Amino acid sequence: MTNEPKTWTTAELRQLYLKFFESKNHAIIPGAPVVTKEGSNTLFTTAGMQPLEPFLLGQSHPQGQRLANVQVCIRTTDIDSVGDDSHLTCFEMLGNWSLGDYFKDDSIAMSWEFLTSSDWLGLDPSRLAVTCYAGDDTVPQDTESAQAWLKLGVPAARIFFYGRDDNWWGPVGQTGPCGPDTEIFYWVGDGNPTGEPATNESWLEIWNNVFMQFDQRDDGTYEPLTQQNVDTGMGLERTVAVLNGYANIYEIDILAQIIQTLPAGVEDSRRIITDHIRTAVFMAAAGLAPSNLDRGYVMRRLIRRAIRHGRKLGINEPFINKVAAAVIESLAETYGEVKSQEAIILTILTAEEQKFGKTLERGLREFDKAALALSDNKKELDGAVAFKLYDTYGFPLEITQELADERGLIVDVNGFNEAFKSHQEKSRTATAGTFASGLADHSEQVIKYHTTTHLLHEALRRILGDTVQQKGSNITPERLRLDFAYGAKLTDEQKQEVEELVNEHITKSLPVTREEMSPDSAHKAGALGFFGEKYGDRVSVYTVGDFSKEICTGPHVANTSELGHFKIAKEESVAAGIRRIKAVLV
Ligand code: GLY
């Protein structure tokens, strides 16, 4: 008799995880809504610890000091990675917490037992590796975690130490609980495990254990908390894929059910539609509807991007209803509140499809026309075209950028912002100040990132030297992206210095001013300006306090105090000699 390999379901892993932590005296608590309340640090719940912040800071929790749950998390900052084997904008996080109860040794021992014991997941220990915090001037190396792993039999060669970028977690906002973490990786590559998690993508992170011992203050300093906490997060979808030996997460039960409603074709597009509609269903179930206003705009972008990818798959009729119904079916057993709202969720999503469906074809034709009209040596689509696509045909800027990218073009984002601003001004005048469209709000976040990009550009030049030159920029309501010429990977210290320098100038509440002058005077005044030097007789120069001066069409915030706290989310190479930084304001 042959032993069929077991196929794990998501329901099984959820239940087993909660059962394990129940057996370790944890109270099982419900997850929080995915859409956060107005005034929260983030638009959506991004981590299981977020609703628990007051308790991590010392308030006593009515259900005790040991908690566990399943939290649906939305992280749209990962949107650019969706389509690969493991990233989602929405995932279920299995989490357990110690609120001043057990600490590193016990947390690590419990994780190891759950992952490797044949009573639980029974994963092969020889395919696991762990990372620990390397330490810096303020917080020493996490040797306790490394010792705990060694004691459990993890060989020293599978324990890696990394800095702030990799092994530090939190705070979610500008201030709050944070600390070093230890992360657990599973080898999903062919052959024997090799290399290390920082450089080999076949090491897939499945779980992190954060040791929340600090409260990050406004000024960036760390205040030790009165209690030592543990906050862990395990990705449900990834772990089920790993347990089943699948090459990608879309093979797991709840995602396979959705993706198979889509025709074969461009695989990235199938994955993007699956992910985005699933996220939009969770948002609709939480009471959100697409709009031009912050949370609603994120939802609108997800749905419209999915529809556009439907066209790439050759689907020319409405299809969101079918995909969304499959999503709801996949969630019905676990998330009864989603199933019970099926009718309203489908109405919200299909109304958005109808609305966009009316203008999509014409917008695509308009895009093609504009792209074809570009001469061979002009690779940049006018901002005015992108604005027309936005304003007349409902194309979020990111869709136009994606279309451009597919043809090796870029979009003049400054020009788009300029057109946006002048449209707003005209509308304001026309309606005698009663203009209250959410467009303004969408643009505000983009404007904040725009000013932050100037601060980052200057900070990079001060820390890395003035050979640093901006090569490109892409801004969405969730993040900025800056490409710049520089020959080497930034060290953790350099990234930290850049963050500190940007934040220092945000905290200084510097005014942002605009002056018009000739390009010559602008250069003489020391203004940076690298964008193709295609200036007319007069240019705008934006000055941020005594820190930065750049030729730019704007728009910008009036004062850096409007920006929030700056954080580098990723630093990577995009081409020889060109680095890319993605950063967020929290
Ligand atoms: N446990 C922290 C996180 O990954 O969200």
Image: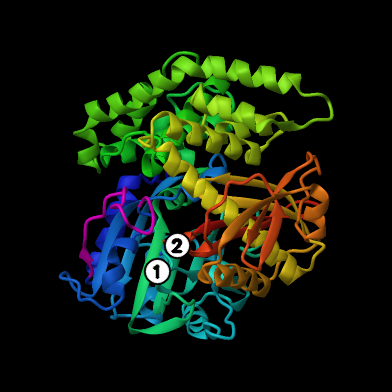
Residue 586, how many percent across, how many down? 46, 60
Magenta stretch: dominant secondary structure: loop
Q: Is residue 39 magenta?
A: yes
Q: Which residues are magenta?
A: 26-44
Q: Quadrant of residue 277?
A: top left
Q: Residue at x 35, y 22 (%)?
A: 350
Q: Amino acid at mark 1?
A: Ser
Q: Quadrant of residue 485?
A: bottom right
Q: Left or right? Give the position of 81 relative to 41.
A: right
Q: Residue at x 39, y 31 (%)?
A: 257
Is residue 306 positioned above or below 168 on the image? above
Q: Residue at x 40, y 44 (%)?
A: 294
Is residue 57 positioned above or below 326 on the image? below
Q: Left or right? Give the position of 472 relative to 510.
A: right
Q: Is residue 216 magenta?
A: no
> Mark number for residue 207?
2
| Colouring rule applied to residues | rainbow
Q: Residues within 10 Å of mark 1 (few under 14, many from 20)?
A: some
User: Disc 2, disc 1: CB below 8 Å?
Assistant: yes
